[in-house]
Amino acid sequence: ERVLPDAPLAEYDSGFLTQAMKQLDRVLNHMDEKDYGIVNYSLVELIAHSFHMSELWARAKLYYDELALSPISSTICDSLTSPDSDVLPALELLALKIKFPGLTSGSPPPAPPADGLKKDISISAYEISYGLKSKLKQSPKYRRHLRNFDFDGSDDDVI
């Protein structure tokens, strides 16, 4: 599955007390894996992304805790999960953009170094998703095409 219904629990070394050390250890333990993290990210970017996501999840938890005390109406839930919602198709597209940088821009990413290690900081590291929000707001045609796109199948089938 490209987009999961919820975030899987991360496997952290329980020997560390702080979240930062747990994340650093996780990134360092997986940094040589071809499909770990965002394609073509350098080690510095993988660490920064891990810390950034930790901050994002911590901030989101504040809202989650608030919602847990007074759940949102089923009308809102239904509108987010309905076939007419742009949420899931936007997440599917984002997942493909993360896995295959350059897929929608027409600019293929630079080839990874011959030794397979991610060393250089990519110039467009955080540009993979920020343009999507404005496209969704500005173009009903884009939104309609996105909703109707068939994301089912393997990555090779979809691409």
Image (spheres, grey):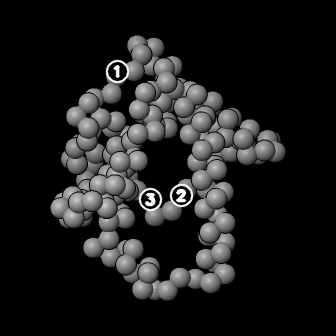
Quarter of the image with the C terminus is top left
Q: Which residue is mark 2?
A: 7
Residue at position x 25%, y 41% in the image: 104
33 left or right of 129?
A: right
Quarter of the image with the N terminus is bottom left
Residue 4: assigned label: 3
Crowd band around label 3 with a 10 angstrom C-alpha radius: few (<14), some (14–19), many (20+): few
Check contact, mark 2 vs mark 3: CB within 8 A.
yes
Q: Is residue 1 visible?
A: no
Residue at position x 63%, y 30% in the image: 28
Residue at position x 37%, y 74% in the image: 81
Is 96 situated above or below 38? Answer: below
Q: Which residue is mark 1?
A: 111
Residue at position x 66%, y 72% in the image: 65
C-alpha distance separating marks 2 and 1:
30 Å
User: Where residue 48 appears, x then y in whole percent?
Assistant: 60, 36
Report helix, strand or loop for mark 2. loop
